[in-house]
Every structure is written in C-alpha cells, then in structure tokens.
Amino acid sequence: MDKRDNQSLLAELTDRFGTGISRHEEPYGLLTIHTSKELILDVLAFLKESAGFTYLTDITAVHYPDGDNTFAIVYHVHNLLENVRVRIKASIPVSDPKIPSATTLWAGANWMERETYDFFGVQFEGHPDLRRILNMDDLDVFPMRREYPLEDPNRVDKRDFYFGR
Amino acid sequence: MSQITLADRPPGVEGSGFFATTLDKAVGLARANSLWPLPFATSCCGIEFMATMGSTYDLARFGAERPSFSPRQADMLLVMGTIAKKMAPVLKQVYIQMAEPRWVIAVGACASSGGIFDTYSVLQGIDEIIPVDVYVPGCPPRPEAILDGVMRLQDIVKSESLNRRNTPEYKELLEKYGIATDNG
C-alpha cells in the first residue's frame, strides 16, 4: 500500500469540505488543518471512516489569550495502516467554550475530553459524563487557562534570602 | 572487641538487686525502640526509604522490623513524597485511623513544604493537615538522613509523658487540625 501523502489527503479534504478547511500548514511534515466547531465532527468522521484514521491519539486545547481570546481544540488522529498522522484544530471563543463531543466516534475520547474540561473548562456537548478527572473535585478554577500569574507575588516563605542565595 | 554500644539506662534509683525508675521512662524506652513504621510513600523519597529498610541501612535495628500497611498497628507514620491536594483527605484519614500513641515524620522537601512543586495542585507541606513531629530535609534525603529522623523521633518518644493524648496541649493541637480526640 502506498503511503498517503499530505497533498493528496488535503485534496480529498478540500474536495469534501471546500472552504470548511479554513487554512492548513505542515510543520515538520505534520499536516495540520483548521476547521470550525460546526464541521469538526464531520471532518473527524470523514477521516475515520473514509481516510483510515481509525486511531484517536489525543484531544487537548491551547489557550490563545491575545487578540480574540480563543481556545484551539486540538485533535490528533493516526492512520495505523499507513502510519500517517494528522492534526485538526478548531477555534472556539473562551466566552462560550462549547464544542460537540467526539465520544460519538471514539469511546476513547471520553477521558481526553474530561481532561480538557478539567484544565480548560471546555464544554463538550453530548459527553456522557463530563466531570473532572485529574484535579480535585472542589477546585473552582481551570488551571491551564492563561489568566493566572505563575506564582503568588505575595509569598515570602521561598525568598532566595532564606536559602543563602 | 565488639562494636556494640549499649543504650544508657534511664535515671532511677539503684540498689543491690533492684533498680527503680518511673513508668513513664520504662514505657518510653519500650515505645522508642519498637516504632512500627507506616510508610506512606508516593515518590522518590519512598525509594530512599526502601533502601533504608534494606540490609545496608537496616531500619530493623531500631525495632522497626515490620512496616505496617494497616494504620491500626502502626505508630510512626512516615510521609514520603509529594502529597497532592487530592491525596490530602486520604492521608488525613490514614492518620485518624492510627491508634494513639502516634507520631509523624515528614520525609523530604515535598512532604515538609511542597518542595519544588509550588503549584495549585500540591499540598504545601503535610503540616497543613496533620501534626508533624520530625522533618527530614533533603531532596531526596539519603537513607542516613531518614535514620537520623527516626533517631530524633526516638528522643521525642523517650521523653514523652505516658498519657500524651489526655494533655490539654495535645487536645488543642488536634482540634486545630479538626481531628477528634475522643476516639480512645
């Protein structure tokens, strides 16, 4: 079986979704496509069922606080037969962080989305059990959002002076 | 010539054929030399403790031959490693389940102060939730340091009154941590 190359896959995707694939890049040869939250499930379903990307490697998010203040929800999928990986990104606003859940396609998305909810507060609509998975249940913040200082500036117990530095 | 050193006997009254001392001292001597450890090991300090239990450093010399994994038959809780805030209620429950008399050693930087993990998910020292008797510094401490911590605790145990749990200071301390003292 010939190894699918990025260009032919990109051509397949643009044939199917047209301008739904808003832009793409290829950092280090990894095809990365950008789409919208309306199309994300269709794109993932197409990749899984038609293009052979049967393995969901990861779901996570990145917070971009500058400019529009958005989350990029990042999906990594892997074609195990041809050993090809693709990254899909969908941007959603932080003020309304909702995106359809991928648990309808992969059961494995369950914990990945729970983790993304735990750290970013992204609401995955249609997730069967969206609660925290790593942090304690009574944590009232989403720690990976870039809206907190890295360290409490008022702490005095770990000043260099006390350690002879 | 043997290298064995004998422990000094406690102060007391001595005569021909008898030796009298206070019950406090005799019981303290017994308790100090049979501290049964409950290792609560979450990270690298736990590995150092395994070396401490091993034949080279041999914690068994101190009467700590049996590491108890049941809180009910242990009197020396060794907390070794990072305690996340999610783990804090578990640690507190283990401490509450221990019978009096009980002592706690915080081994290493993480258990003592949160160590390098100055972050939202890590408890900044176990003394936020349970009282601690001895802190062992180091990251991780060598087995010698853990042995030193145990020996410091032995000094504390030797000089402790027979019935610490009924003293007002101890009750006040435990109430500060929100731990009930009427369990025995």
Image (tube, coloured by chain):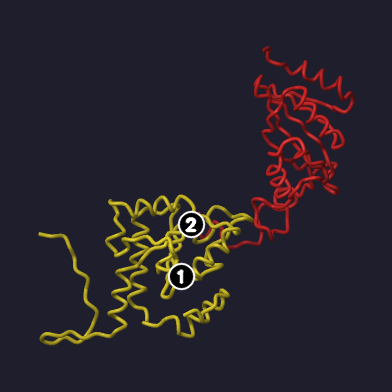
Chain colours: A red, B yellow
Q: Mark on residue A114?
A: none
Label 2 is placed on what type of residue? Answer: Ala
Residue B156 in the figure: left or right of residue A2? left
Q: Would you name the residue on which mark 2 appears?
A: B109
Task: Give the chain letter at badge 2.
Answer: B
> Residue pushed farthest top?
A2
- Residue B152, percent from left and from top: 35, 67
Which residue type does callout 1 highlight?
Met
User: x, y (%) of residue A86?
Assistant: 72, 26
Using the image, determine if residue A69 lies above or below residue B31. Answer: above
Q: Are marks 2 and 1 on the same chain?
A: yes
Judge left or right: residue B1 versus residue A112. Answer: left
Residue at x 69%, y 46% (from the top left corner) = A115
For the view shown, which residue lies furthest in the right direction? A19
Q: Nearer the viewer, residue B127 or A85?
A: A85
The residue labelled by disc 1 is B98
Q: Which residue occupies the foreground of this view, B57 or A66?
A: B57
Instruction: Identify the image quadrant of the N terminus of chain B.
Output: bottom left
Q: Residue at x 40, y 83 (%)?
A: B163
